[in-house]
Amino acid sequence: MRNKWRPANLYLVAVFAVLYAPIFYLMFYSFNSGGTMHGFESFTWEWYAEVFQDTRLLIIVLNTLVIALLSAAISTILGVVGALAITHVRRHRRRKALLSLNNVLIVSPDVIIGASFLILFTMIGIRLGFTSVLLSHIAFSVPIAVLMILPKLEEMSPTLVDAARDLGASRLDVLTKVILPFIRPGIFAGFFMALTYSLDDFAVTFFVTGNGYATLAVEIYSRARQGISLSINALSTLIFLFTIILVTGYYFINRRGAKQVGWEAGK
């Protein structure tokens, strides 16, 4: 019982309370029939119905999902290629340099990245809209996918590849029947993380969206500037729940991958 109330545990509870209290406050008032966030009158689904009746908003939701799925899929494929290339670099300094370059887009401020993409697209003549948003999301999702996939590649024993080659497997067979099945949990983890980052991104997307095209994050920001509307609360609640589902899926995939590795190691 004493261990449960250690200072470290109390600090952790306080941190989670500070982080999640505003979210739960927002979610609670998304069911308020009063239309304000000051006094709860009665329970209602009115604001959720308003969200689903808004045709423009549904189109923006579709745009966001298409961008997120496409960017996550493409960045995961590029992440697999990048992780394989990094593992084949033998010199420690070169590998460290490649990893540092890979992490630049992760540690760089989103405002700088967004402004850089805006300047780049303007210079090369790419019209701001679907293409510019997709390219920018792929760019900042690839390093995330690489970081998810690379540890699984480093866990794989080189003897697996050597044994496959000794048995006459071609390079394509080694890749598709040995390497990819082994790193599958990392691939799924990279896909889900890239998908989550794409859905939640605002700063970069804000710079590269054009007139007539928007994602959910940008739309919520523009609506919040116009005044308080509990439809924003309802929309934010739906996004939060969808993100929770993605994170839960990522957790179970990782857990399943760990069990599979443990089972294979015990054979």
Image (spheres, grey):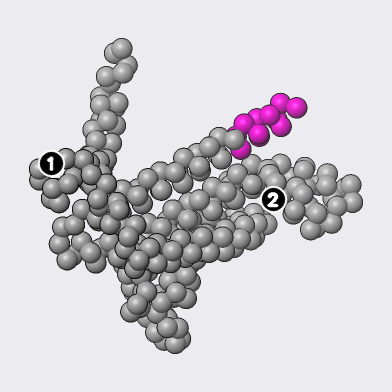
The residue identified by callout 2 is 180
* Front: mark 1 or 2: 1
The dominant secondary structure in magenta is helix
Q: CA distance from mark 1 to mark 2?
A: 55 Å
Q: What residue is at 47 percent from the left and 76 percent from the top? A: 131
Q: Amino acid at mark 1?
A: Glu
- Quadrant of the rendering where the N terminus is positioned: top left
Furthest residue toward top? 1
* Mark earlier in primary sequence (1, 2): 1
Q: Nearer the viewer, residue 236 or 190?
A: 236
- Residue 41: which disc? 1
For label 1, the SS is: loop
For label 2, the SS is: helix
Look at the image and say whether residue 262 sits in the magenta stretch: yes
Measured as percent of width and height from the top left, residue 124 is found at: 46, 86
Measured as percent of width and height from the top left, residue 185 is found at: 60, 44
- Neighbourhood count class around disc 2 (C-alpha, 10 Å): few under 14, some 14–19, many 20 upward: some
User: Residues in magenta?
Assistant: 257-267
